[in-house]
Image (spheres, helix red, strand yellow):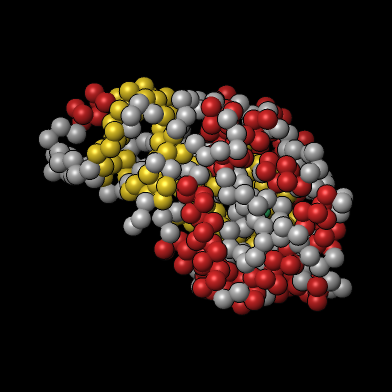
Amino acid sequence: MVDKKIDLLITNIGTCITVSGPDRPRVNEEMQELGEIHGAAIAISDGKILCIGTVHEVMKEIQGMTVIHRINAGGKLVTPGLVDPHTHLVHAGSREHELAMKLEGIPYMEILARGGGILRTVRDTLEASEAELVQQGFQSLNQMLLHGTTTVEAKSGYGLTVEGELKQLRVAKELDSIHPIDLVHTFLGAHAIPLEYRDNPDRYVEIVINEMIPAVAEEQLAEFCDVFCEHGVFTVDQSRRILQQAAKYGMKLKLHADELEPFGGAELAAELGCVSADHLVAASDAGLIEMKNKGVIAVLLPATSFNLCTGKYARARRMIELGLPVALSTDYNPGSSPTESMQMVMTLACLQLRMLPAEVIVASTINAAYAIGRGREIGSLETGKKADILIWNAPNIQYIPYHFGINHVHTVIKNGKIVVENGSLRQC
Ligand code: IZC
Ligand code: ZN
């Protein structure tokens, strides 16, 4: 090891939350295990963690090695970078005009049924050039990075034509290559039924199955396939057919399940062995138990419940009690959750889902990483993992969800590089 160089050495870490543990999502009481090290240091080489421990341990291990750059964490709190496993990142425009409609009592699904909502964003996104979409997505990613998110899942679903979906996925690939945040790509052609197929939704499902999935696979544009399985969008049977085809093409599976009413989504996610089922506000106990038995991760999106003003939140306590691995996400999108901030989600998870601050950290790091198939590479601070690290302006982890509505991130290190310094993006 002696000839190895340390690219970055972080010393004087007050408390380091490593979230280290077994190579699998955390369940039950494990969701409260943070793997704290007091008086810690982290040595980084080639974008990865070379060693982590107390200052004494790390200094001993790296003795004789050249240290190229070092930072003093000033006794602050350090955690893994946050992972956001469910976003509709690439889109054009925004939908603030829906706010007054919502306050008048018009439900989200009714706005969609009138040709607004998702379909409004589809029109805006189809009209936008790839360069415009890259520009808008880049700004959102900057916000995410400033708020401590270092890996993001990004769905398509605002094209709803073969070309439109491919365009969105290509933009996501481009963003992945030009922005420090790492992206994980998901095909969501089954996001809404286009108006022209309203009278024959199965015809649209056929296009998703026979044209879109093969085209997306051919260009290797998506690792996951997802479906918005809900009353008024895609039925359980249609969702099953789409996901089975995606699996044939080598994609891993996700599902928007039981967001607004009990619809059999959790049961379907278990039946198909989805990596995650997301939302689950109205999921049945039977469905949750089936998910647990199949190891499906529950991705909860409390900012969406908050923003939809329904007063209905996922039963996180019940899920944790049942032994389901729970992850958190923003659901960032221009309709039901216009926020890039995982810190906002963490506050809502505590106050509305009754999750403990420690559980919220685990759900936003290692369990979120497993929800996008990255649990072995990110989500905790352990030797060999990516050096995705946050230094916080917060005395302890409880303080982050407690003191809400502001950004507590001081420094972001992504793949071993400092990308946010003193709360501002570093020019590179
Ligand atoms: O644009 O409204 N729920 N899809 C499913 C969304 C929200 C995104 C949107
Ligand atoms: Zn979504």
Rendering quarter of residue 65? top left
Residue at 52% over, 51% down: 143
Is residue 37 found left or right of 154 in the rendered image?
A: left
Vertical arrangement, residue 130 with respect to residue 142, above or below? below
At 19% from the left and 44% from the top, the residue drawn is 68
Residue 146, placed above or below residue 122: above
Q: Is residue 126 visible?
A: yes
Residue 188 figure quarter: bottom right
> In the image, what residue occupies the spot 71% across and 60% down?
95
The mark total stands at 0
Viewer-side residue, 85 vs 181: 181
Q: Place residue 79 in its image quadrant.
A: top left
Q: Position of residue 26 (x, y in %)?
A: 54, 33
Asked if 246 appears above or below 281 in the picture, the reply is below
372 horizontally vs 53: left or right: right
Closer to the camera in the image, 201 or 259: 259
Quadrant of the frame with the C terminus: bottom left
Percent across and percent down for residue 274 are 63, 50
Residue at the spot 76% in from the left edge and 60% down from the top edge: 97
Locate residue 290, reporting x and y percent.
71, 40
Rendered-image quarter of ligand 2: bottom right
Image spot of residue 142 (x, y percent):
48, 54
Give above or below for 110 relative to 73. Answer: below
* Residue 296 seen: no
Quadrant occupied by the N terminus: top left
Q: Is residue 421 left or right of residue 310?
A: left
